[in-house]
């Protein structure tokens, strides 16, 4: 048997199928992943598509986290001031000492929570920035359409090599249909 030269190859560098390789031959598409291999005859392939996409849910979560971080950051100082003033007022009044001690301890704990708002807001803002970065990177998805099934292979970011590979597969598929 004469070894056949591939028309195009694409190595998946990120995503769920990282490390696998797609190879296009004149009559088939071969997907090798680890210790498994799948061969799809081009006659079984109905269409091929490729698209760069961004997940709008990541943007929504990032905006929500930024709003919560902003609210926590803005509420921390006034809440600390109010709780401190209440605690100082309790110290000035003489009354039942056990009730005063309980109120003072409660206000101190609440003040500690208010002081934790700023670091929590910073962590939430950091998470929001990470989500914004992943939203901006997006992913490129190669879709292989069979008679009743669709197979997706996604990689992180805008990947021109995957787009070129899809164009070669589409051209080979079109030449076989003609």
Image (cartoon, grey):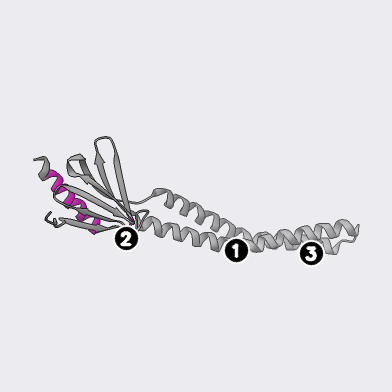
Looking at this view, name the residue that lies furthest to the left. Answer: 178
When asked about the image quadrant of residue 33, the answer is bottom left
Q: Which quadrant would the N terminus be assigned to in this image?
A: bottom left
Q: Is residue 13 left or right of residue 96?
A: left
Query: Which of pointers 3 and 2 indicates the residue nearer the eye?
Result: 2
Report x, y in % for residue 11: 27, 59
Task: Say which residue appears at 50% left-offset and 51% top-offset.
Answer: 64
Q: Return the disc, 1 or 3, that comes first in the chain's sequence.
A: 3
Number of numbered tags placed on the structure image: 3
Specify whether 5 is left or right of 145.
left
Side of 5 relative to 11 (left or right): left
Quickly name the residue at label 2.
13
Which region of the structure is painted magenta?
155-174
Q: Residue at the location (16% across, 56% down)?
A: 6
Is residue 167 shown in magenta? yes
89 sits to left or right of 62:
right
Location of residue 41 in the rendering, given as x and y in whole percent from the top left corner: 19, 44
> Mark 3, residues whose alpha carbon is within 10 Å: few (<14), some, or many (≥20)?
few
Q: Identify the residue position indicated by label 1 in the image.
A: 118
Q: In the rendered structure, which disc, 3 or 2, sits on the residue that comes first in sequence?
A: 2
**Is residue 85 found inside the magenta-colored segment of the image?**
no
Which quarter of the rendering shows the C terminus? top left
Determine whether 151 is above or below 94 in the image: above
What's the CA distance linking mark 3 and mark 2? Answer: 61 Å
Check if mark 1's residue and mark 3's residue have beta carbons within 8 Å.
Answer: no
Mark 3 highlights which residue? 88
Asked whether disc 1 touches disc 2, contact meaning CB atoms under 8 Å apart, the reply is: no
For this rendering, which residue is in front, 76 or 127? 127
Earlier sequence position, callout 1 versus callout 2? 2
């Amino acid at each position: 048997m004469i070894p056949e030269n591939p028309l195009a190859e694409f190595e998946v560098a990120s995503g769920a199928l990282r490390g696998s390789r797609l190879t296009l031959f004149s009559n088939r598409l071969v997907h090798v992943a680890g210790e498994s291999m799948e061969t799809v005859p081009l006659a079984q392939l109905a269409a091929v598509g490729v698209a760069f996409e961004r997940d709008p849910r990541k943007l929504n979560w990032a905006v929500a986290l930024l709003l919560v971080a902003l609210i926590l950051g803005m509420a921390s100082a006034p809440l600390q001031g109010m709780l401190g003033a209440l605690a100082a007022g309790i110290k000035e009044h003489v009354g039942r000492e056990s009730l005063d001690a309980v109120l003072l301890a409660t206000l101190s704990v609440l003040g500690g929570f208010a002081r934790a708002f700023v670091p929590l807001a910073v962590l939430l803002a950091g998470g929001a920035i990470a989500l914004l970065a992943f939203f901006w990177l997006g992913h490129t998805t190669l879709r292989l359409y069979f008679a009743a099934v669709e197979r997706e292979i996604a990689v992180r970011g805008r990947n021109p090599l995957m787009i070129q590979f899809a164009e070669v597969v589409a051209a080979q598929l079109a030449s076989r249909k003609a």
